[in-house]
Image (cartoon, rainbow, N blue to C red):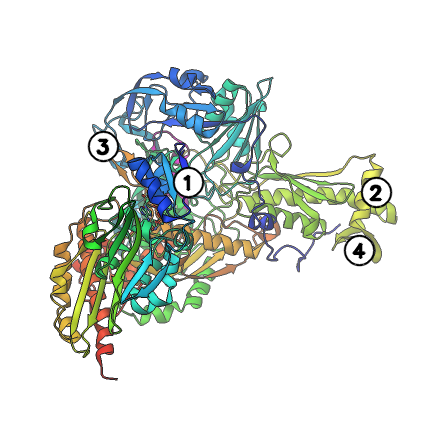
Amino acid sequence: MGNPAPPYDVVGKSVPQLAAREKAAGLTRFVTDLSLPRMLHGRVLRSPHPHARILHIDTRKAKALPGVKAVATWEDTPKIKFGPRSEDWTIFASDKARFHGDEVAAVAAVDPDTAEEALDLIRVDYEVCPHVVSPLAAIAPGAPLVHEESPGNVAAEFNISAGNIDQGFDRAFAVYEDSYYTSQVYQAYMEPMSVIAETDLSGRLTLYTGTQIPNMMRMTYAKALGIPPEDIRIVVPEYGGAFGGKMENNIHLVAAVLAKKAGLPVKLTYTRHEDFLAGNPRVPMHIDIRLGATREGILTAKDVRVVGGAGARLVYSQVIVSTACYRVDSLYRFKNVRARGITAYTNTVPTACYRGFGNSQSTFVLESAMDELALRLNMDPAELRIKNGMGAGETSVHGWKIGSSGLKECVEKATDAIGWKEKRKVKQPLKGIGLACCNHVSGNRPFAREFDGGSAMVRVGKDGRVMVFHGESDMGQGQNTTFAQIAAETLGVPLSRVHVAQVDTDVSPFGLGSFATRGTLMGGNGVMAAAKKALAQLAETAGNILCVPPERITCRRDMFYDVDAPDKQLSFGVVASQATIARHGAPVVGTGFYKPPTELPDPETKQGNISPAYPFGCQIAEVDIDPDTGQVTVTRMAAAHDVGRAINPMSVEGQIQGGIAQGLGWTLMEDMHYGQGRLLNADFVDYIVPSAFDMPKIDAILVEPEEPNGPYGAKGIGEPALNPTMAAITNAIHNATGVRITTLPVNPAQLLARMKAAGSPGPELARNQNDRQDTH
Amino acid sequence: MRITPLEYVTADNLSQAVELLDSAGPQAAVLAGGTDLVLNLKKKRACPCILVSLQAIDGIDRICLENGMIRIGAMATHDRLARHPLLREKADILCQAAGLIGSWQIRNAGTIGGNICNASPAGDALPPLLALDAAFVTAGTVGETVISARNFFTGPGQTRLPSGHLLKEIRFPCPPANAAGCYMKLRRRKAVDISIAGVAFQAALNEEGTQVASAGIALGGVAPTPVRVPGAEDLITGRSPKEALENARAIGAACVAAASPIDDLRASADYKRTIVNVFAQRCARHVLTTLKEKGKPQ
Ligand SMILES: Cc1cc2nc3c(=O)[nH]c(=O)nc-3n(C[C@H](O)[C@H](O)[C@H](O)COP(=O)(O)OP(=O)(O)OC[C@H]3O[C@@H](n4cnc5c(N)ncnc54)[C@H](O)[C@@H]3O)c2cc1C
């Protein structure tokens, strides 16, 4: 029974997502569409203050309102401190509210209107405390303390070094040093957070919710609720996007507390406003960088200090800050690096994962610094990257083993596609072109706890229907389709035969979930292993019928056949049916797993190969600058990404488009604004995300070196699609204006002022640009 | 989120609508496209007891030219304004502004009457209407009143609409063939964004095509109400387009002087002034260049 070899029948083909038709027709049932009989509707009362002592909560009037079935506060919870990686969470604020939006009380009622009306009847006496929003201000002496137990608001620290930084800088010919800031931004997924919670008579809790980490979340919530994990079941229906935001969040626990108290199912769906106030936006970061290189452009040293804002409790910000400290070190052949990271408590919404996981923040900074070095060395920025870029077979400064690397090819293909050389040579006024590279992981050993691989079950029914069970999470990115393609290829059946089961922790394997760009590689390898196991069982049945040893049986294009006598054939359907009959009804089930060749980093040196594979990429942006308004238009982008073999090229291109859209938004418009500690733009009127018209034409280029550890040679794309976008655009702005952007997002007024100060062309009104605006 | 329960009436005709408004007094609100009002109801910024919808009234969305006046029914949607052949020919500035409002969906639902009565300082239709010397015809139980656009707005969300009246129609003198107009707004993205600062610039030549006979320049988003800028208009009228163009910088400066923007989340007051200056000059260049072409003997 041989492995399928290229050319493949299903893998590598562009296919629409399995759920695409239903979604396009409006038939998909997202979490917000679901309802259960006698289900109640929950609403949360939130703190209007960024920091306030809670003196008293009076819920009597709310409880008395007809239609109200439960009112809950901290008093109704098990009062256990918990957290995904910390113990600074409570279900509802206990003594203090620590951010504008902190959960103070909640109501479950027969309809949303009654629940909302009840909220107005809850009286809370607050004593307002001084607050702190900026991460730097939070760690300054004398700042108000968010948690009394954490002096200086230091929630976590991370230090890493390798080589000798002083010697590295001594050898440098050019050194660049500057301070950067990246804003707190919101994932803006289409469906706000939503959950239905219900408790059965034994006390067992079921949550129907869109989550990236059904199994890991269950462990956290078991602790919070003081019940064993097996008493929590999580079902993941189709859901409308996450981008890192949908992991642990108090929404699920508030719903669970209400459901238990009311003895009825409770649905809790955030309004968009609430989702801004109490979601899990990106960790804002101050990053200071010092970067040195020899006259020839060989990088000699990198020194970094990162201060990230956790908000009022730790979701994953401390791990995100540590990622920002060192992941990018494996993009280039660094020898001497040092980084210090501080995660600071602040009085804002708790911050967490957002596509890129700290690597996007530091990629923006490193790739800006690389352009500054290129300038000082009078070298083509593309050449500087190629000179230092990690290649296949190399081991990075932190011990990461690069199995495949298409970095050099990415730079070459992107520069060719967009005409980089000519455009850098013939500089046009107010037009600019800029480039940035990135690396990432496909799984992250230290983030996962007991293991980091993937697994699946493949069930073949008597009817020949193939069902893939996995414990990861398709949030719309197309994971189910990719898994189905892998299963179909491995079994030798058409894609139409394969279906993917909804994740249900009672049934599905214990998957770690969708994060760290791990789904395709880890989950995909798990699916492939399970499909092989199922295939072996079917081959045995086929062999019995054909009187051929099973090793000689294989399946392709839905037919089992003898490799030595290919005209001896049996259809997949017949074999599936016969196999089930022979087992008196038991289905053919293959269970398989993938154990990646990764290592937990040494706690001291942090050396260790944390991922089985590392994707790379290069993006190039072209911009037009309005000399009179400072407004930036991105006119074109080329994005070449090393994804290993693309299982579904169409889906990979979609990821690239989406990553660029989010990166462009972050670069040019997105920022969560605080005033007096309150989030001022908690809506889409003033939290601006790019529209279709803001998007440039994108050349998505797939670079496909075969990844030895990937299923059919694949690695991940989700996060790398965004990582280089910010610096590609700001490097283009620098090319156009001479202004180095060190703060995201770009503020047109400041850009204009700095252009004037730098004597850039304009603000003469001599040109005929933008005389009329486009109507959309 | 929740809309406080209220009574909802679809008026069959204008007189029924005004009678309902008159009898309910300040407790009543007119519903046009609902793109502002429904949000205000949800946020409890408006809490009327009765909503009077104008959707079913015949003819209240008419757009026509009569006796030298362009007349636009209050219920005309932005999408219709943006594409209407008569307006495209005679008053394109209004089409430009309407076409820059919101999204396709918002332009299909939102009306010019709603934009006016909502009286947001940033309302996109307002500066062009001021620049076109529009007047608003309001209807009540005892008859109609006519209020000029220049006098209609008194503050954010505040107008001189008489109580118990509704806005029935917008009128303005039809600009001559040798007129041109331009509207520009500052946006943070290229579609679906509130105007942070807007400039409307309308001008017409005399019959000989030699001089600018009339000009209307108005600003949005940079004062509590949209404002006209007579100081800038004076720099244009009575001059040839070529001479007027030489005043471009002064026009920009006059517009800045007429603006009194505030710092807010969207932009600083300073930046808004910069934008007014830039857009006023760009509009001037666009309009005066077009007029120069139109003035040339054929
Ligand atoms: C997503 C979005 C984007 C938007 N973008 C823009 C934009 O770019 N530019 C812009 O200017 N606006 C924008 N708006 C605001 C809004 O769409 C416009 O102001 C629109 O013109 C309002 O018209 P309407 O018919 O929907 O008014 P409604 O919401 O029905 O009414 C608005 C107010 O006017 C009153 N009213 C309406 N008609 C009459 C009448 N005939 N007589 C008396 N009172 C009346 C109502 O009682 C209410 O107080 C946007 C809104 C949304 C939701």
- The amino acid type of the residue labelled 2 equals Gln
Helix, strand, or loop for circle 4?
loop
Residue A578's tag is 2
- Gap in Å between the C-alphas at discs 2 and 4? 20 Å
- The amino acid type of the residue labelled 3 equals Ala
- Secondary structure mostly taken by the magenta-highlighted segment of the chain: helix
Q: Which residues are magenta?
A: A311-327
- The verdict on a common chain for dots 3 and 1 is no
Which-is-in-front pick, marks 2 and 4? 2
Whether residue A754 is visible, yes or no, is no
Is-magenta flag for residue A316? yes
* Mark 2 crowd level (few <14, some 14–19, many ≥20, 10 Å Cα): some
- Gap in Å between the C-alphas at discs 2 and 3? 72 Å
Q: Earlier in the sequence, mark 2 or mark 3?
A: 3
Q: Nearer the viewer, residue A651 or A326?
A: A651
Q: Earlier in the sequence, mark 3 or mark 4?
A: 3
- Gap in Å between the C-alphas at discs 3 and 4? 72 Å
Is-magenta flag for residue A607? no
Q: Nearer the viewer, residue A20 or B151?
A: B151
Residue A140's tag is 3
Residue bearing mark 1: B9
The furthest residue to the front: B142
- Gap in Å between the C-alphas at discs 3 and 1? 60 Å
